[in-house]
Image (cartoon, rainbow, N blue to C red):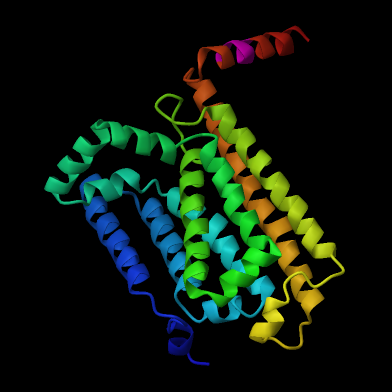
Amino acid sequence: MIVIDWLTPWEFSPTLVVVFIASAWLFWRGAKVHHVGRFRQWLFWVGLIMLYLSLHTRVDYYAERMFFIHRLQHLVLHHLGPLIIMGAYPGQVMRAGLPMSWRYKLRDFRETGIGKVTERLLTHPILIPFLFVFFVLIWLLPIPQFYSMIDWRLYRFMNWSVVISGVLYWNLILDRRPSPPAAMRPVGRVLSPIITMTPQIIVGVWITFSANDLYPIFDLCGRAIPSINALEDQGMGGIIMWVLAGLVETFGVIYALATVMRLSSRNRLPLPLRKNSAVAQLKKSAS
């Protein structure tokens, strides 16, 4: 199969194309204003391309017909793609890419009651991690999985829900600032990936070792790789969720821990944490 065939959308979505073009345009314009470094630019473009290839190419055809490819797709949509994009810290850059009149309107909206509530919800340190896990696990239930595969509207909602929840979650975890102004406390950023990965690992293990075909919809749709039977396909998908997704969130733990250490070295942690750190250092010196 030639490259153009792989890049041809399985199901064309004008909304998706508009969103990707608008995101690319805003970041490109904003990068000129903020003079964003090459590494951050590469992170953004690589993450954006990964999301596009997973959502709007022939990959989608195979994701609808093989469970393990479906899990690889969601690994990119929910974990890897949003993580890489948010590692570029694109918020301020994309805001700078807006026309000046839009920036004023956005600033004014953020000062309104609705704007403040909206911003609070989109950065809530409990709600966002909950949605991050919820939108992975809900689509792995056999009944929602079945209907999402036969209804294109539900299928697109499924994919967008994991992308958006992933972006909002990694926006919290990768924040390098103290709290405030960061929405989540530094220690919370360390603990959150540990908490969110636990139910995903449990479900991944359960899927991997299940002796029953949990997702017959992939047989009904016609498996794209007939040589891989249902249980083999299911087992590989479970391992992807169990191991690969866990590795991505482990990186989040390490990154957040590095942030805590950096803030501590600069005395920018909240006062109770600085006291605990000082006590721990005194005990270490005494021993």
Can residue 278 be seen by looking at this rendering?
yes
x, y (%) of residue 274? Answer: 56, 14
Report the residue at 58% width, 42% height from top: 130
Left or right side of 93 for 123: right
- Outermost residue on the left side: it is 101
Report the residue at 68% width, 79% height from top: 218
Left or right side of 72 for 95: left
Report the residue at 71% width, 67% height from top: 237
Report the residue at 74% width, 52% height from top: 201
x, y (%) of residue 60? Answer: 53, 77
Please identify the quarter of the rendering in which residue 43 is found: bottom left
Left or right side of 197 for 157: left
**Magenta: predominant secondary structure element?**
helix
Can residue 71 be seen by looking at this rendering?
no
- Looking at the figure, which quarter contains the C terminus? top right
Relative to residue 79, is residue 109 depicted above or below?
Answer: above
Q: Which residues are magenta?
A: 274-278
Count of number-bearing discs? 0
x, y (%) of residue 221? Answer: 64, 84
Instruction: Specify whether residue 129 is painted magenta.
Output: no
Relative to residue 274, is residue 36 depicted above or below?
Answer: below
Instruction: Specify whether residue 276 is painted magenta.
Output: yes
Please identify the quarter of the rendering in which residue 67 is found: bottom right
- Outermost residue on the right side: it is 211
Relative to residue 106, is residue 261 depicted above or below?
Answer: above
